[in-house]
Image: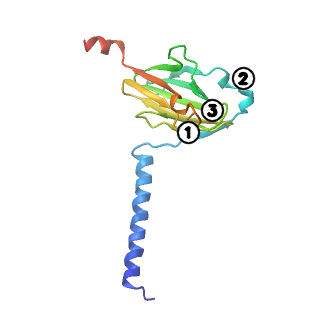
Amino acid sequence: MHIDQYERTWLMLVVAVLAIFFAALVAGAVVYGVRLPEPVGRVNPNMLQDTAFANPGLYYTGDTPEGRPHYDLYVLAQKWNFDAGSSESEGRHQIIRIPQGAEVTIYVTSRDITHGLIIEHHNVNFEVVPGEVAAITAVFNRPGEYGILCHEYCGIQHHAMWMKLIVEAPAEDAAASQ
Ligand code: CUA
């Protein structure tokens, strides 16, 4: 079978581009640890009082085999705030504190409409759909303050829908740096 020279070149280009995309996918998953948030369950948005989202919050669940403290964080998204059960806040924006090195499994759902949730500088990026529980596990190694933001347009106060995560360095580090 005769294949025209140009045809052959384009075919090879297409194969090469596909190979590059596939390599990028594999590298992302294996080398960079990219994970998509998974829907882990369904809830009736009108019956949240019967679920773990009745008491959103940060719950210590023990240490991981690597010695990291592990937490479950339940977040309820609604127009127009995130409720993570924290009593500390900046105005109506809650503040969550975790120790440096903590591993956190974040569970999130929406009470009303579709929202988003990203954590600055971390591999945490959800679409928050009412009726669905999404979960992802992330490790927080760098001390600092990180915004937790709604990044899906959800109405007039969308821009004001955020809270804050503070990753705290151990106290002896703070003392040593003074
Ligand atoms: Cu919630 Cu935008």
In what element is the residue under mark 1?
Answer: loop
Residue located beneath label 1 in the image: 153
The image quadrant that residue 14 belongs to is: bottom left
Question: Is residue 117 visible in the rendered structure shown here?
Answer: yes
Q: Of discs 1 and 2, which sits in the foreground?
A: 1
Q: Amino acid at mark 1?
A: Tyr
Q: Residue furthest bottom?
A: 2
Residue depicted at 40% across the width and 64% down the height: 17
> Residue 7's spot in the image, x, y percent?
41, 80
Which comes sooner in the sequence, label 3 or label 1? 3
Number of residues whose C-alpha sits closer than 10 Å to that of mark 3, classed few (under 14), some (14–19) or many (20 or more): many
Q: Quadrant of the N terminus?
A: bottom left
Q: Where the C terminus falls, by quadrant?
A: top left
Front position among marks 3 and 1? 1
Tell me which amino acid carries mark 2.
Gln
Q: How many marks?
A: 3
Q: Are marks 3 and 1 in contact (CB under 8 Å)?
A: no
The spot of residue 113 in percent (x, y) is 65, 36
Q: Earlier in the sequence, mark 1 or mark 2?
A: 2
Numbered label attached to residue 109: 3
Cβ(mark 1) to ligand 1 < 8 Å? yes
Which image quarter has ligand 1?
top right
What number is the disc on residue 4?
none
* Looking at the image, residue 53 lies above or below residue 126: above
Q: Give the residue at the far front of this rendering.
A: 156
Amino acid carrying mark 3 in the image? Thr
Give neighbour class at mark 1: few <14, some 14-19, many 20+ (Cα, 10 Å): few
Q: Left of 109 or right of it: where is 105?
A: left
Give me the C-alpha separation between circle 3 and circle 2. 13 Å
The numbered mark, 3 or 2, whose residue comes first in the sequence reads 2
Identify residue for label 2.
49
